[in-house]
Amino acid sequence: MATVTVNGGQQVHYVDHGGDGPAVVLLHSFLMDVDMWLPQVEAFRGDHRLIAIDERGHGETPADGPFDYWDVARDALAVLDHLGFDRAAVIGTSQGGFVGLRMALLAPERVTALAVLGTSAAAEPDEVAAVYRQLGDVWAQDGPDGVIDGVAAICFGDTFDATAWKAKWREHYQGEHARLLIGVLAGRDSLVDRLGEIQTPVLVLHGTADRAYPVEKAEELVAGLPNAKPLVTIADGAHFLSLTHAADVNPHLKGFLAAH
């Protein structure tokens, strides 16, 4: 584990898993951290140099004030600078996909390939954003216990044991910090009209049981991205499917990375 200071004083925690293969940046979901990628590290480490990043406000990476996902994308690019990589592939689940898409727009020459899972290019609809902000208010004022099981069900589905992750949420995401992170999620901008600018090869995977974003959001991505591969749907896959359905998604990710 390591920490680097980037972009005017922002500390970013990351794990460089080492290896001599091509660099791959791993970007986790909302409320998660670098440990989300342990199934992929186990499967891919021999073939790739895997770099998992705690995104701003998550895990061991602080958030000292307002930010957006463009800022997080710049953080990830700065970590690559620090490690001496001009180019890398990027894999992102949900929020990590938001960040990966923005990396590809900010520095198209640096993102060799992009895989996104359970993500969307669209902004949250106003009514959904309002519900998220209300949830953030409740979480900040009353603590996570009244909402955490419902949030976990959306993220992990019904069959994955999320006990350890919910314990992390209770420990790390309290008060105004929780409100800040939920506000960033709810207030993100749309990229739908800019997808045509992303020329890098993109693999889109989506679970059929995703409770956060319907499969139509994945179809929108594939339709708008000039070099998107055919959509891969994972039967009964939950929103955080890179973790909950790793055995199903890993062969697709491994083949995509090998090709690009």
Image: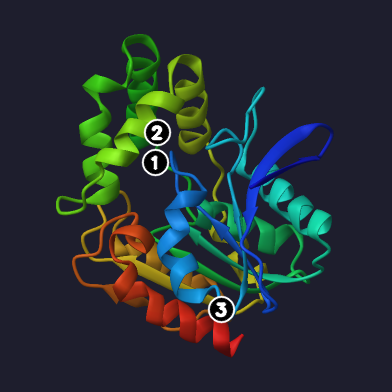
Q: Amino acid at mark 3?
A: Gly
* The residue positioned farthest toward the bottom in the image shown: 259
What SS does tag 3 mark?
loop
Q: What crowding class fits label 3: few (fewer than 14 Cα within 10 Å), some (14-19), or many (20 or more)?
A: some
Q: Locate residue 134, reporting x and y percent.
A: 34, 21
Q: Is residue 257 left or right of residue 235?
A: right
Q: In the displayed structure, would residue 42 be above or below residue 34?
A: below
Residue 40 sits above or below residue 31 on the image: below
Q: CA distance from mark 3 to mark 1?
A: 41 Å
**In front here: 29 or 71?**
29
Q: Which residue is mark 3?
A: 46
Q: CA distance from mark 3 to mark 2?
A: 41 Å
Can I make out residue 94 in this image? Answer: no
Quadrant position of residue 171: top left
Residue 185 can be seen, yes or no: yes
Q: Earlier in the sequence, mark 3 or mark 2?
A: 3
**Residue that numbered label 1 is attached to:** 125
Q: CA distance from mark 2 to mark 1?
A: 6 Å
Question: Is residue 218 placed above or below 97 in the rendered structure?
Answer: below
State the residue position of label 2.
Answer: 129
Contact between labelled residues 1 and 2, with CB atoms less than 8 Å apart: yes
Residue under the point 46% across and 35% down: 186
Work out which quarter of the rendered image holds the C terminus and state it.
bottom right
Residue 150: horizontal and vertical position, in percent? Answer: 21, 34
Residue at point 30% right, 35% down?
A: 166
The residue type indicated by label 1 comes to: Pro
In this picture, residue 88 sits left or right of residue 150: right
Report helix, strand or loop for mark 1. loop
User: x, y percentage for residue 90?
Assistant: 60, 66
Residue at 57% over, 33% down: 57
